[in-house]
Amino acid sequence: MRIAKVEYPELDVPLYRARLEEFGRDGRGCLKAKGRRGIEQFNVFFFDTLGFHGNADDYYDPRNSYLNDVIERRTGIPITLSTVYCEVARLAGLRAYGVGFPGHFLVKCVLAEGDVIVDPFNTRTVSRDDCQELLNSFSPGGPPVSDEMFEIAGARDILSRMLNNLRRIHAGRGEFARAVQWVEMDIDLRPESPHNFRERGMLYVQMEEFGKALSDLERYTRLVPASPDLSQVREQIQLIRKLLSHLN
């Protein structure tokens, strides 16, 4: 709820925590079997009874990224739906973890007889072949699906990915100051990541905050001197310097 608290400062976090716990209790009551059959029963509860589903009609609505809104509206994007799924499943007694699959967040349910991959956005379990099709839809001609793509995502990685989603949404809407807000949260979260300085610098260019943009972009070139995009960033730096010289 850390991200939601930024949008809703008065958010009653314990209320939503209690709602998730209620979902978990109800979910546990629906589990009559173990193993894969138990996952199927939980999916019926989560997707059919509770009604959670992907918001394909309005994917870039910022509310899809706020967990309180996802819980209230029962819809969201892959990463937020997966986060809610994992929490409710855990409370129901299952071992479910977020998976940072490229381009589309998934859930891995760990069982003694083997893992089951769930796609909460599309309300179904998926096979490895399904995941290859999904990957091809994002990256035609890209690499084959590998085990590394199903590694469990840490809490910090999940939060960072959510912040990056919000940055892109607000930048795409021309709301550059809001986008900067999310980048700065990610800088606090991952101070070791240089790419956030590039992102913030480019947003400052859009805001005509050229001094701040220059500082961020120069810092990026110092931190990542061998980056493939270094020539483009240096070109942008030269343009900013020219603009600043004319303004002064």
Image (cartoon, helix red, strand yellow):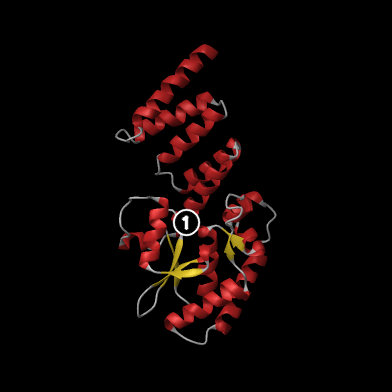
| Res 92 visible | no
Residue 242 screen position, x and y as percent:
46, 16
| Image quarter of residue 70 | bottom right
User: Camera-side residue: 141 or 181?
Assistant: 141
Secondary structure beneath disc 1?
helix
193 vs 22: above or below: above
Residue 216 screen position, x and y as percent:
45, 31
Work out which residue is located at the far bottom of the displayed protein and give it.
Answer: 32
User: Camera-side residue: 193 or 96?
Assistant: 96
164 vs 199: above or below: below
User: Camera-side residue: 101 or 191?
Assistant: 101
Residue 159 screen position, x and y as percent:
50, 54
Residue at horizontal 49 percent and vertical 28 percent from the top: 213
| Res 99 visible | yes
Q: Quadrant of the N terminus?
A: bottom right
Residue at horizontal 49 percent and vertical 78 percent from the top: 40
Work out which residue is located at the far right of the displayed protein and give it.
Answer: 10
132 with respect to 49 (left or right): left
Kindly identify which residue carries mark 1: 158
What type is the residue that disc 1 sits on?
Ile
Residue at horizontal 35 percent and vertical 76 percent from the top: 114
Residue 36 screen position, x and y as percent:
43, 80
| Image quarter of residue 16 | bottom right
Q: Residues within 10 Å of mark 1 (few under 14, many from 20)?
A: some
